[in-house]
Image (tube, helix red, strand yellow):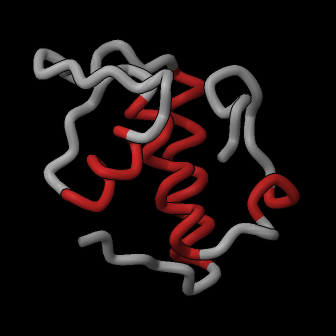
Amino acid sequence: ILATSDTVALTDADLQDLTAQELTYARNEIYARHGYVFESSELNDYFATKSWYTADPSYDGNSLSALEQQNAEYIRNYQTNNNLGYEVK
């Protein structure tokens, strides 16, 4: 969804055309790149369709760069500030 969210700081312009669901997926995409195994079947099913995703049960969150952490928080704040929350199943 946001292919460069691991290398470029996000801005409102990057997020403005995304739906609440897409924003949630984009935020979790940051974690998925590192193999995060989601509790949500919806997110697991979605990322399982991506050729680049490999689940890593040993993922502990320490592999996220400062920029990735910043971008995940930026998306979360954007969603909150714009009433774009999405509850995954």
Q: How many marks?
A: 0
**For residue 78, side relative to residue 88 (left or right):** right
Is 75 or 86 nearer to us in this picture?
Answer: 86
Q: As rendered, which of 32 and 84 lies closer to the eye?
A: 32
Q: Position of residue 53 (x, y in %)?
A: 41, 26
Q: Quadrant of the C terminus?
A: bottom left
| Residue closer to the observer: 30 or 64 | 30
Q: Which residue appears at 31% of the width and 23% of the height?
A: 35
Tell which of 24 and 52 is nearer to you: 52
Q: Position of residue 61 (x, y in %)?
A: 27, 24
Q: Relative to 12, is 3 on the left or the right?
A: left
Relative vertical location of residue 18 with respect to residue 55 in this rendering, above or below:
below
Pick out the residue farthest to the bottom: 83
Vertical arrangement, residue 28 with respect to residue 82, above or below: above
Q: In the displayed structure, does residue 4 sit left or right of residue 23?
A: right
Q: Position of residue 25 (x, y in %)?
A: 49, 55
Q: Is residue 70 above or below residue 28?
A: above
* Residue 78 rendering spot, x and y as whole percentages: 62, 66
At 35% from the left and 38% from the top, the residue drawn is 48
Furthest residue toward right: 13
Residue 54 in which image quadrant = top left
Q: Quadrant of residue 49?
A: top left
Q: Residue at x 49, y 22 (%)?
A: 52
